[in-house]
Image (spheres, rainbow, N blue to C red):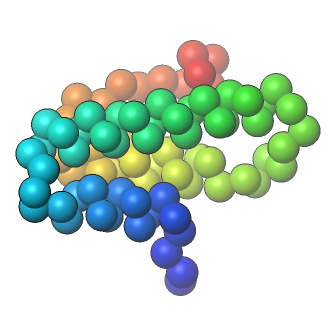
Amino acid sequence: MPVTAMEKTVRDILLDSHIRKSRKIDRLRELQSEARGVQRAGSESSMSADDGLQDDLRVIEKALHDLNADTEQKGAATL
């Protein structure tokens, strides 16, 4: 199965030995916020329902979990 751009980005962040864990978490949270913003915009337009944004969020949230970061649980109503 091919690696998505988000999976590559997240993997690069996780494997970067030059940045601290706290910075990795900050960067992942930035990506999470951006992905949620795109998802929110998509819900207000005619974007495809199967646009991969849920997959991107899952990848980011798994990485945050793997770093033992406190993850925020947000449903669709709080996007």
Residue at the farthest right position? 46
Q: Nearer the viewer, residue 52 or 34?
A: 34
Q: Position of residue 33 (x, y in %)?
A: 47, 31
Name the residue: 10% across, 61% down: 17
**Looking at the image, is 78 positioned above or below residue 62?**
above
Query: Which of the two residues, 56 or 73, is positioned nearer the viewer here?
Result: 56
Count the numbered circles shown.
0
Please provide percent x and percent y for residue 42.
76, 36
Residue occupying the far top of the picture: 78
Residue at 68 percent of width and 28 percent of height:
40
Left or right? Give the position of 28 relative to 2.
Answer: left
**Residue that appears at 73% across and 30% down:** 41
Seen in the picture, residue 35 relative to 16 is either above or below; the reply is above
Q: Where residue 69 appears, x then y in whole percent?
A: 20, 35
Vertical order, 26 against 63 (above or below)? above
Write down the quadrant of residue 22 in the picture: top left
Q: Quadrant of the C terminus?
A: top right
Residue 68 appears in the rendering: no
Residue 55, image quadrant: bottom right
Quick check: 68 left or right of 57? left
- Residue beneath the point at 49% across and 45% down: 57
The answer to whether 61 appears left or right of 25 in the picture is right
Image x and y of residue 3, in percent: 49, 75
User: Is residue 62 at least partly visible in the picture?
Assistant: yes
Question: Outermost residue toward the bottom?
Answer: 1
